[in-house]
Image: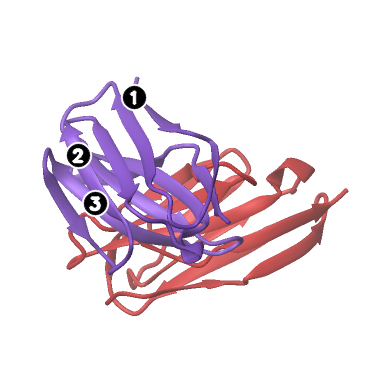
Amino acid sequence: GQQLNQSPQSMFIQEGEDVSMNCTSSSIFNTWLWYKQDPGEGPVLLIALYKAGELTSNGRLTAQFGITRKDSFLNISASIPSDVGIYFCAGLGETSGSRLTFGEGTQLTVNP
Amino acid sequence: SQTIHQWPATLVQPVGSPLSLECTVEGTSNPNLYWYRQAAGRGLQLLFYSVGIGQISSEVPQNLSASRPQDRQFILSSKKLLLSDSGFYLCAWSVWTGGHEKLFFGSGTQLSVL
């Protein structure tokens, strides 16, 4: 089956720093979605990407759909304490039907 | 607008007891519905998905079952819980717009089997 490798697994940064995380897949994806999960809550959709090369922003967040269609990255600029949480990438491939494949998540800690 | 309701938020059950978690979606018709499980601090494992009433696909062999008695209702059940069934259960629904899919999650149920 399709696999997603999300890195880094965890990050510890100072408030105000920029953050970058990425996901790579073993096969071509048609859709990349990025989610944030707060403790005890369901993941919330941040950004959706549907075309190779697409670059989309949501406030201080920017995500890109890789040209090869096998990767995506998420950047957070000028981090703040409320950015703390687990960030997940998810992808939908050509052979996965309606079943998204999720990365293992990046745990982000922001020190004030 | 569409909303998803999942309950209860937390549940503590003894081993061997039955389970029923319910999820309903409002504001959309014929959604794809999903049940995921998440171990503490880990990724999301797809358990079941449904593309319509009475249509259930299971992704992994397990002690759980799912049912979709109505278009916007999805139920996760077990006849006898195991310790390994503990985890954070998430219901989700997806919508296709312009040929693209987005997945939205409920707020989750933290299940502890003791």
Q: Which is more N-terminal, label 2 or label 3?
A: 3
Q: Which residue is mark 1?
A: B2
| Quadrant of res B33 | top left
The crowd level at tag 2 (other Cα within 10 Å; few <14, some 14-19, many 20+) is many
Q: Is residue A39 left or right of residue B106?
A: right
Q: In which chain is the residue bearing label 2? A: B
Chain given the colour red: A
Q: Which mark is residue A92?
A: none
Q: Which residue is mark 3?
A: B49
Mark 3 to mark 2: distance in Å? 10 Å
The crowd level at tag 1 (other Cα within 10 Å; few <14, some 14-19, many 20+) is few
The crowd level at tag 3 (other Cα within 10 Å; few <14, some 14-19, many 20+) is many
Q: Nearer the viewer, residue B70 or A16?
A: B70
Task: Report if the CB atoms under discs 1 and 3 are less than 8 Å apart.
Answer: no
The shade of chain B is purple
Q: Residue at x 55, y 64 (%)?
A: B42
Q: Is residue B69 left or right of residue A72?
A: left
